[in-house]
Amino acid sequence: MVGHSLGGLLAILVAAEHVDRYEKVSVISSPLAGSKVAASLRWLPGQPKIIRDITPTSPKIELISQLKLQLPTLSIISTAGNLSLPVAREHNDGVVTIESQRALSFGKKIEVKANHFEILMHDKTMKLLNDFLFEDSPMIKSTYSHTFKKDIDR
């Protein structure tokens, strides 16, 4: 299972509940420790429930911080695109802080120099996902490997 941003939180929570149904999990640019900005905004009237759900002290974020998922897990961390705002003082990818992306206490972590959105189609991300998801399937891996011949270390 692969999830980007908030989808990464969902991927981890679903996989943790159904370990027998998934073989691997990968999260991309996910706020694994929640969002301090969301914590600041949660008191404003009219905020959607998701703002409360991604604060660092929300039950879902606290659950993720305590998990030790027993599946191979890859966390791809986007490190470019820093957005400077008075409420976002920490280094971020334009949306999620780097610190929050690094918070997963299990699995492998790899950084890619791309912003929150560019990372999705970045050559290095595609190669990392291909290698991780299909490492045990040489037939599938070789079918897709021609796509990743470009220089992935931009």
Image (cartoon, rainbow, N blue to C red):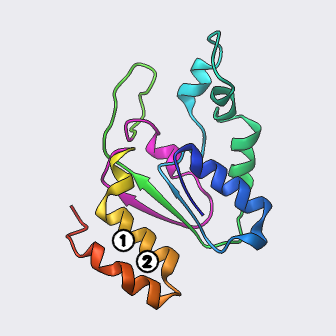
Can you give x and y, in whole percent of width and height, for residue 38 in the image? 58, 26
Q: Are marks 1 and 2 in contact (CB under 8 Å)?
A: yes
Q: Which residue is drawn at 44% across and 45% down?
A: 98
Locate the N terminus by quadrant. Answer: bottom right
Q: Nearer the viewer, residue 62 or 152?
A: 152
Could you tell me how many numbered marks the image carries? Answer: 2
Image height of 69 relative to 60, above or below? below
* Horizontal side of residue 119 vs 20, given as left or right: left
86 lies left or right of 1: left
Q: Give the range drawn in magenta.
A: 93-115
Give me the disc on residue 60: none
Where disc 1 sits, the SS reads: helix
Q: Name the residue under label 1.
A: 127
Q: What residue type is labelled 1?
A: Lys
Residue denoted by label 2? 131
Indicate the position of residue 56 as horizontal and vertical percent values: 65, 36
